Amino acid sequence: MNRKQIGAWALFDFANSSYSSVITTAVFPVYYAVEVVGGEGGDGERWLGYADSLAALIVALSVPLLGAIADRGGARKKFMMFYTFVCIAGVTMLTTLDAGMALRGLVLFVIAQVGFESAVVFYNAYLPDLAPPEKHGRVSGLGFGVGYLGSAIGLLVAFPLVDRLDLVWLTVAAFFLVFSLPAFLILPADRKTDMSIGAAARWGLVSFKTIVAEVWALREMRRFLFAFFFYIDAILTIIVFAGVVATQTFGFDREGTIVLFLIVQFSALTGAFALAKPTDRVGPKKVLTGVLLLWIVTCVGVYFVQDPQLFYVMAVIGGLGLGSAQAASRAFMASLIPKGRESEMFGFYALCGKSSSIIGPIVFGTTVDLAGGNQRPAFLAIAVLFVIGFVLLQRVSDPKAARGAAAA
């Protein structure tokens, strides 16, 4: 393994995590729901759910094809850079947002979110190239662990600036830009292929049905992606709405919400690092099985918890499951990918993650709306998604077990 390349790869996770912690989770959702949209009865959550679902739909429909084009046209790094800059531009434009500009806020959030999520697809595709299968868990855990450290630092930087949100947005954009540069400079250059990007695009448009059929024929990947579809939907939905729940259900102010998410980032970092080696040792399926049980307990617990101090406890437990679930899922996916089709397959990984994310935010926002603004019942709806993902995961063969059987 090339340690320098792995370090640069992990640093990109560090860079983009300032966006995910500040824009996706802790600061922007509360600002958008409470100050930009305003009102009561779940209006802000509903608009935010629509924005997140629209971004997820765009990513879901585009990245499988773009991934196939990147593999055949040798353009993985080019796509990663392009979408990174799209995200940075969207965040920078948030400085033009003010109270009452709900539509503008929706559009800018969608632009930034599409850029962020699409860049991550091509970033993830480097994992099989950087590490052998028996090290996927450790390297994936390193990326998420360093990423959650970046999330914590992003929140620490944002904390003293919460009364000047324009500076918060600019700080996030600058953080993402500066710390992504090593990845663009050090990660392996795009491989030359016998297709230009234009030819690869034409091939992809004509052959996309065949590409889908080839993915469908990979039985274990198909089974894993179905399970991933449901449980990642639940996780991403909680990430989007956690800040709003902390503020409106448990009475946290903006500063208190940032402190809460700082604690969650460090618990997620702990989870990602602590379960990285076990993912390689016992296999990602066993790790994910335990983590999904932890998430189900957390969601049910939030429904019953009334004390804000107990909500801190539930948030820490959820954070432990957050980092480990994401790292183990990425390692699981990497172990199932045929050589030379990394961007394409991680495009379908994103397809499942983002198309499922169309469902979760709508379910959450609609449940809150039907409950007259009460956010607690929405967590029971999310728990159902975790249960479905848990059941489907049990049908997937563990790649660790299969390697062990072959070696014996």
Image: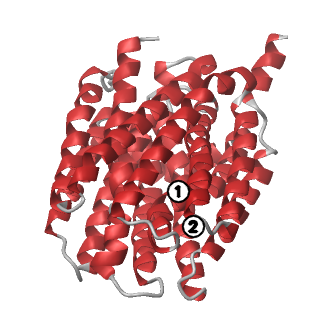
Q: In the displayed structure, would residue 358 be above or below residue 157?
A: below
Q: Which sits in the foreground, 177 or 67?
A: 177
Q: Report if the CB atoms under discs 2 and 1 are less than 8 Å apart.
A: yes
Horizontal relation, residue 298 to residue 404: left or right: left
Three-letter residue code for mark 1? Leu
Residue 37: % across, % down? 32, 81
- Does the rendering let one see residue 233? no
Please name the residue shown 61% across and 58% down the image.
Answer: 310
Q: Which sits in the foreground, 251 or 318?
A: 251
Q: In the displayed structure, would residue 363 be above or below residue 74?
A: below
Q: Mark 2 points at which residue?
A: 360
Please name the residue shown 75% across and 46% down the image.
Answer: 393
Horizontal relation, residue 94 to residue 256: left or right: left
Which comes before the other along the chain, label 2 or label 1? 1
Please name the residue shown 62% across and 73% down the image.
Answer: 376
Three-letter residue code for mark 2? Gly
Q: Mark 1 points at which residue?
A: 236
Q: Is mark 1 on a helix, strand or loop?
A: helix
Residue 143: % across, % down? 45, 30
Q: In the displayed structure, would residue 129 be above or below residue 219?
A: above
Label 2 crowd bin: few (<14), some (14–19), many (20+), radius 10 Å: many
Please name the residue shown 60% across and 80% down the image.
Answer: 367
Can you say which quadrant of the picture contains the C terminus? top right
Horizontal relation, residue 146 to residue 267: left or right: left
Cα gap from disc 2 to disc 1, whole angstroms: 8 Å
Residue 75 disc label: none
- Does the rendering let one see residue 174? yes
Residue 267: % across, % down? 53, 40
Residue 386: % across, % down? 70, 57
Look at the image and name its color scheme.
secondary structure
Q: Which sits in the foreground, 56 or 179?
A: 179
Q: What element carries label 2?
A: helix
